[in-house]
Structures are given as C-alpha cells and as structure tokens.
Amino acid sequence: MRIIRFAALAETPWKNGGGTTTEIAVSPPGAGFEDFDWRLSVARVASEGPFSRFPGIDRTLTLIEGAGMRLAIEGREEATLSTDSAPLPFLGDVLAEAWLVNGPIRDLNVMTRRGRWAHEVLRLDGEAEVSADCPTIVVALGEAALDAETLGFGDTAWMEAGEQKSFRGKGLLVKFTSATAA
C-alpha cells in the first residue's frame, strides 16, 4: 500500500480562472490529458460555468466539500450534488454546465479512457473491509484509518490487487478495471 498525502500535492489553476485542480494520480505516470488511461484529481470550483469536454472519457464526480453544485448534463435530467449524494457518472463527450448552490465546492473527479479502463466510485461511511481485486484507491474525507495508517482529508491509499484492509471513517473507494482484462 502506498500513501499519498493531499497536503503535499500541487494545486494548478484552471486557464479560465474558475478553479484549481490537484492531481492525485494518473496512469501512465506523467501522462497528460491527451494520453492518460485513467486520472484521479480534486477540483476546487470557485465559479459557475461549462465543463471542459473530454471525448472518449468516462467521468465520475463526487462532491466532497461545500454546500452543493447543480449540474446540467446533455441527455440527462438536471442533478444537484451534495456531500451526501451518490457519485455521479457521465460521459466526458457531452456538454455539461455547473452552478454553485452556495459558494465554492471541492469534488473528486475520476476519469478513464473508454475502451482501455473503467472505474467505479463508492462512498465509505463507518467501518468496512476493503478488498483490492484490481488497482484500488481509498480517499479519506476527514480523519480516517486504513488498518493502522491514519489518513487526513484528501489523503489517498493506493492498494494493489490482492490487498485487504480495514477502513474506519468517511471516504471514497475508487476501483479501476482494465477493459482488456474483461
């Protein structure tokens, strides 16, 4: 298991000035937007507006801090995300626009290149056994523990296939599956 401390990661401003992104992990390492297989990041959204489009990418957004965000996604009913909402999957190819409910928010953004990788994001609350049958990342949403390892807000634990850990606290479980392994 490898721990990535959120406080040690760099925040990058968006070109439009509406927020920042903190990249947690990308595969392959060092890949950019044109050639990543999968990507995990936290966005700090400070203003309303359209999302960047990512053709060929499957996305899931999960609100992790703030009052909420309304989303209009092409081909779907409008949705409002809160810190209690289920993770919201959608296609990166379509038009999407967001409105903040009451001030800035932070969300976890998971992206996978369709045809190469798939992903699933689940909320963890309380105690749970976490088994990694594929590359799995646990993201803490406050003080949490994974076995004896203490995690703070945004800290992530990268588990390799075959590992099993006990989780306590609030967090998110992100599982990546290779499309070629299916």
Image (spheres, rainbow, N blue to C red):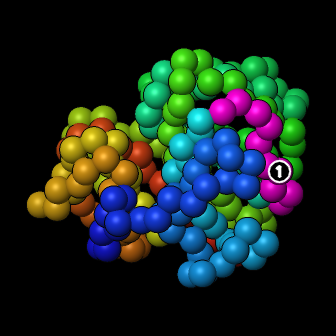
Please tell me how crowded label 1 is: few (under 14), some (14-19), or many (20+) other residues with Cα within 10 Å: few
Q: Residue at x 67, y 42 (%)?
A: 18
Return the residue at label 1. Answer: 53
Pick the residue in front: 65 or 175.
Answer: 65
User: Where in the figure is residue 92, as x and y percent of width and height?
Assistant: 79, 49
Query: As shown in the figure, which amino acid type bears the numbered disc 1?
Result: Arg
- Chief secondary structure of the magenta span? loop
Residue 149's place in the image compared with 44, above or below, is below
User: Where in the figure is residue 61, as x and y percent of width and height?
Assistant: 60, 41
Q: Is residue 130 magenta?
A: no
Residue 166 in sight from this viewpoint: no
Residue range of the region highlighted in magenta in the rendering: 47-56
Pick the residue in front: 139 or 121.
Answer: 139
Q: Residue at x 78, y 20 (%)?
A: 77
User: Where in the figure is residue 155, as x and y percent of width and height?
Assistant: 33, 57
> Quick one: quadrant of the C terminus?
bottom right
Pick the residue in front: 114 or 36.
Answer: 36
Residue 179's place in the image compared with 111, above or below, is below
Quarter occupied by residue 141: top left
Q: Is residue 48 magenta?
A: yes
Q: Residue furthest left?
A: 148
Residue 69's place in the image compared with 20, above or below, is above
